[in-house]
Amino acid sequence: MKRRLAAILAADVAGYSRMMAEDEEGTLHTLEAYRAVMSELIDEHGGRIFSIAGDSVVAEFTSAVEAVRAAVAIQRVLQRRNADLALERRMEFRIGINLGDVIVEGKDLLGDGVNVAARMQGLAAPTGICISGALREQIEGKLNFPITVLGERSLKNIPRPVQVCRIDWDVDAPTIPGVLHSGAFELPDKPSMAVLPFSNMSGDPEQEYFSDGIADDIITALSRYRWFFVIARNSTFAYKGRPGIDVKQVARELGVRYVLEGSMRRVDNRIRASAQLIEAETSNHIWAERFDRDLVDIFALQDEITQSVVAAIEPEMLMVEGRRAARKNPTANLDAYDCCMRGVWHFHQFVPDDNMQAEVWLRRSIDLDTNLAQSHMALARTLSARIWWGWSRGIDQDLSAAYAAATRAVALDDRDAYTHYSLFGVNMLARQHEQALAEAQRAIDLNPNFALGYYALGWIRVYIGRFAEAIDPLLRSLRLSPNDPLAGFQVGWLALAKYHQGNYEEAVCYAERALRGRRIPVVFRTLLASLGQLGRTEEAKIVLAEFGQFTFADAERYWKITSPYADPAHRAHLAEGLRKAGVSESSIFLDGT
């Protein structure tokens, strides 16, 4: 008989029997989806499921700290997913965790240590987490989650009283109050960082795409660490080209504790790079290193910088989450990767000519290596963006090509949040609402710092009529990218959500704010409808004059495809506001089809 000490996590569904009686198939479908999410999170934190029966899940961990982290991550993810379900269909788990001696029988675990975890689970409230006193002793001072001691309890079939504690977890949210107002942000309660664009030291402006691509990939790698907070690339790249950047100011404006900066020089097939991690408040250099590598080692270099940053801030993360954050080298064909980086650079310029150039480079990359998921993903995003911006001269052709590229990207790399985001985008345009929602949720599951994932979730919730639930993910997206030059889209969807809630004054404020940067056609539409509902027709005339300057190859098709409502009544509500603003049938597509 083998014995070992283990942290045991036991979970079951509150009210499962009632849910099965009311909707057996729907309940089983949700349970299957939630179990898949739980399994990934348990594995991510170094755990192993050893028992599944009915609605229960029982897993073991070698680390008490990781067991609690896994439990909190599970509750946070399931709460986010529950927001998309009707109240009666929401599936809330109760979780109990115990540290104790267990008996090993094949792949199964038995004994008192498992039984106490099951009793802890029974004491937990729906969405709650209860732990034993023995486990609490092991995690004290190692986690940020508050712990409430509930006292000793007599548990069924346990011969001694057991101290019971509750983990007072909260939502997995960046600090978002004031995100729409200027001023310093409150720091998140976990290590927070921003990666500035790497300086191009080659002296060749043509190499800008290369240094940008290196920094972009490092941001993506760091953002996969669930217990970090990482600012999105659009916000950090807004500092590109600014002379004399003050790290303290950057950290203050983005609301982070650490800033990573570096430089890159590419000479023939050699790369010379330097990087340094700075604690902004003290200006202390936490880590700094110089690198001299062959070009073929580019992916190893990116991983080395990423792991060095993690090790300098939170070395424990490398032991568990490092397995999840590590990525495969995307390609052995460096010419294909180079073309992909060039295409991505052009895509991020967000102007029509560069959008066309992005397509050229990305198709060239795919010709060189058809299995490079990043190129297919970027091509899908390029074509989708072309449609939303109104630049497309063949909407249906671009949509078809974008769908094929996004589908291929996900097939090649199902673990990349960006591939799922690209598939979300084409599903939105195609009015495949259920699929779009699933892709948005999946993107956030894979990358908990993914600003675009939260943006996608808020966006789809607006068009499926969950206007109140759309606000939170849109604000989270803005907190993860507070200095985003394209924030007009996030704020624009906030305006549309407020419009459909009947808060027309707020909708006007948000829409006007969204239009301060880029002139986005779909946001103009929201502003006009809001002014129309408020009876502010004179202001609407001024807006309509500017609105009329937009030209589209196929205006009717453009306005139809960029109104992907699930419920025709919501489209009719928007059309009502536009008519009141004086928009004629010939100016914009208004009917409810």
Image: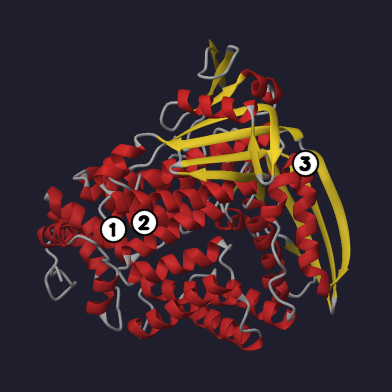
Determine contact: label 3, label 1, CB under 8 Å.
Answer: no
Spatial distance from mark 1 to mark 2, Cα to Cα? 7 Å
Residue bearing the label numbered 1? 463
261 on left or right of 463? right
In percent of width and height, residue 18 lies at: 29, 38
Density class for disc 1 (Cα within 10 Å; few <14, some 14-19, many ≥20) is many
Q: Name the residue rendered at 45%, 69% in the picture.
A: 423
Identify the mark nearer the N-term, 3 or 1: 3
Q: Quadrant of the C terminus?
A: bottom left
Q: Nearer the viewer, residue 327 or 367?
A: 327
Tell which tag, 3 or 1, sits nearer the viewer: 3
Residue located 55% across and 17% down the image: 164
- On the question of residue 404 being in view, the answer is yes
Q: Which residue is mark 2?
A: 459
Q: Secondary structure at mark 2?
A: helix
Residue 120 horizontal/vertical position (percent): 53, 25
